[in-house]
Image (cartoon, helix red, strand yellow):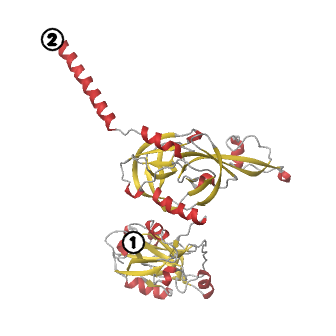
Amino acid sequence: MTRMTRTLSLWVLLVVALFATQSAMARELPDFTELVKDAAPGVVNISTSRVVDRRDSPFRGFGNQEIPEIFRHFFGDQLPTPPGGGHGHSEERQSLGSGFIISEDGYIMTNAHVVDGADQILVRLNDRRELEAELVGADEKTDVAVLKVDADDLPTLTLGDSDQLEVGEWVAAIGSPFGFDHSVTSGIVSAINRTLPRDVYVPFIQTDVAINPGNSGGPLFNLDGEVVGINSQIFTRSGGFMGLSFAIPINVAMEVADQLRASGSVERGWLGVMIQPVSRELAESFGMDNPEGALIADLDPEGPAAEGGLKAGDIILEVNGKGVDRSSTLPRLIGHVSPGGSVDLTVLRDGERETLSVEVGKWPDSQSSGGDAGDGHAAPARLGVAVQSLDESQRRKLELDHGVQVTEVDPDGIAAAAGIRPGDVLVSIGQQPVESPDQLSELVTELPEGSAVPVRLYRDGRSYYVALRLASD
């Protein structure tokens, strides 16, 4: 055999091996064709419109995306109103989204933000029928909404169990990105139980499925063709699908949907506590081996937690036996409890675990406010702060029965390193209430050197803890 023949044979073998490898890989990739055929009829396009009042301005016609740069320099994206207020006129705004049918008699699931503020909601079915929908109810905290159309014998989707999802599992989305009906994208589950800012009630499913504007509210499927989530949002730097996609687990969504269908609103459990994460430094200061749980920084004195015996400084470790691995887990667990129901809370208090039974209340919509400062009084140089006593009017205003206010902070001191600022009220240190500047001096003197100590602060109407590490003198 000549050298050329041998070389040619090697190339043939390499090409055959390459095709064989590609064929094997193709066989291992999932095929979504049957899933799409079965599921597409149950996916709908949702368009909304609302009328907003506007005033004419000299810049009308540019639109917010076309304002000349010189005007943006002075006005940003807020166009000025001409003298006299301009002439009023109405403008119709439209938006697009997706949804899916959950019952034959016309109930449809989507995102709350898809239908937010809508004056009219139109649902386009797979057979091209367009039906006007009624908003049954929407829950902003979970971004779930339920619609109702007047129709019967509609194709429905099969709901799966989102608790069974695993990272690495293949999933697919069907929706109407940019208004294109029934577009299909696929990917894998890249994380579960993901917490997003301002979305503490949803343990999101994170995927790498391409999601674009218009996909919101559409279903996320597993390979069995079951709905396991509602596509809700995407984190991206480009504004396109190149980012992380997040879906609401269908188990969470259906709990909300059942309440919306029954009463049009959602009731959540409430403890009446203000919580914060347990950092590694705080864990050490409380004598914990690892950071876990939700630290109670403050609580409503008339709330369920206070009535159940909880205190500021308690760290909630379990709810009805379920571990609270981080502070963001607690609102979910309590939020799922019906108001009036009882929960067993395992807490860490003074280094010991104990269990308290608390009757959960109903979530109120209220916020607290905070207070100010006065004359200075020296505290130990070891702490690096100057403090003052609180007079009666300040205590009433702040709703505190003890504490001292920080007037100065040494920028090179340990208090500054812990994050303590002028204006903060030191409520307790090392779990001991601070009654006066002199008593603070005694408490600081008695604290052990080189170890982290929990300090409870009151700032801007909120209480929380920092870990103060005391150095040797």
Residue 302 percent coordinates (x, y): 55, 83
Looking at the picture, how far across and down is residue 35, in whole percent?
Answer: 43, 42
The amino acid type, in three-letter code, at marker 1 is Leu
- Report the disc number at residue 282: 1
Q: Give the image location of residue 295, x and y in percent.
A: 43, 73
Crowd tier of the residue under label 1, counting other residues whose Cα lies within 10 Å: few below 14, some 14–19, many 20 or above? many
Q: In x, y percent, where is residue 182?
A: 53, 40
Graded by Cα atoms within 10 Å as few (under 14), some (14 to 19) or many (20 or more), the crowding at tag 2 reads few
| Residues at marks 1 and 2, CA–CA distance in whole angstroms | 76 Å
In the image, is residue 193 above or below residue 374?
above
The residue tagged 2 is: 2
Residue 120 vs residue 232, the one in the foreground: 120
Left or right, residue 379 beside residue 163: right
Residue 198 in the image: above or below residue 397: above
Residue 344 in sight here: yes
State which quadrant residue 467 falls in: bottom left
**Taking the image as drawn, is residue 430 in sight?**
no
Front residue of 467/8: it is 8
Identify the disc placed on residue 31.
none
Residue at 41% from the left image edge and 77% from the top image edge: 345
Q: Quadrant of residue 28?
A: top left
Q: Name the quadrant of the C terminus.
A: bottom left
Instruction: Tell me the mark number nearer the camera, choosing from 1 and 2.
Output: 2
- Looking at the rendered image, the quarter that the N terminus falls into is top left
Viewer-closest of 24 and 317? 24
Q: Secondary structure at mark 2?
A: loop
Counting the numbered discs, the total is 2
Q: Earlier in the sequence, mark 1 or mark 2?
A: 2
Q: With respect to residue 411, does 90 lie above or below?
A: above
